[in-house]
Amino acid sequence: MTPKQVMLAIATPMVWGLGFALAKAGLSHFPPIFLMSTRYALTALVLLWFMRPPTPLLGRIFVIALVSGTIPYGMVFSGLNDLEASTAILIVQLNVPFLAIMGWLLLGEHLGWQRVVGMAVAFIGVGLIAGEPEIRGNPLPLFLVIGGGLFWAYGQIMIRRLRGVGGMRLLAGVAALSAPQLLLGSAFIEDGQITALATAGWMEWSVILYVGLIMTALGYTMWYHLLSVCEVTQLAPFLLINPVVAVLAGVVLLGESLTLFEALGGAIVLVGITVMTVKRRSAPPLADAGETRNP
């Protein structure tokens, strides 16, 4: 990866992590699926002003929008509505093993025993978080977040296969199609949308502006660009920055705190993801290690 790609790979999960905590704050006022629909609607309005989506590929992008946007974010943020941001973001880290498994199964990317061990450790950590009494009493939000991560990972593979489309054009198409999909889902499942808009103050609108313009328009433009030029397995380690920023933002901005189960489980998840994504250095050849050669 070039230095520019590394900088983008660091900035993207930082933007997402802060946005995750801010979105949690927004859920105290907006229904979750409706909040996501306004997020994508704002993104679409901004991006479509500057560019047209790739019209010949709208059929494929419709499916990508459904799988990478509408379904996963509807599920994850519905689950986040009943979980603390710092807990939910640790569970979301299953995106990394899901992404690696998808890359191995569908793109033929290398997996290896190290990643398999890391995945097993990460799943043990999520199991420990699930053992928290409050979560055990109502496991549905946990399963919504896990299921959303699985859909999101598959959506990234679909995007990886879509060649010849720039990140912003692709995002414009995804946002333009995800917004009505989410709005339709919200109309069927949720209520109170009009009241939430009518009573929103500057803080609530600030959340919408951040998740729409910064978290989505800027964050995903960078991410889609990286997916078009880097391997999925190269990008996966940088996603570890996301939970660190989100947990810190949850504690500092939202006043959240982790229980012992959640902190220990989260630490195990991050250890597993680290084991899975950090490459081992190969041993140097014997000749390079000081082997004596005959003249």
Image: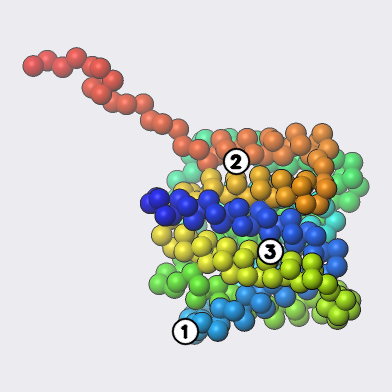
Describe the element under mark 1 as helix, strand or loop: helix
Q: Is 270 left or right of 167, judged from the image as shown?
A: right
Q: Which residue is found at the position 49% from the left and 44% from the top?
A: 111
- Residue labelled with disc 3: 72
- Residue labelled with disc 2: 273
Describe the element under mark 2 as helix, strand or loop: helix
Q: Looking at this view, is 173 or 208 the one in front? A: 208
Whole-angstrom CA distance, mark 3 to mark 1, is: 25 Å
Task: Tell me where residue 15 appears, x and y as whole percent.
Answer: 61, 57
Q: Residue furthest front?
A: 202
The residue type indicated by label 2 comes to Ile
Other residues around mark 2 within 10 Å, as few (<14) / some (14–19) / many (≥20):
many
Q: Looking at this view, is 43 or 81 the one in front? A: 43
Q: Quadrant of residue 123?
A: top right
Whole-angstrom CA distance, mark 3 to mark 2, is: 21 Å
- Residue labelled with disc 1: 56
The residue type indicated by label 1 comes to Pro
Q: Residue furthest left?
A: 295
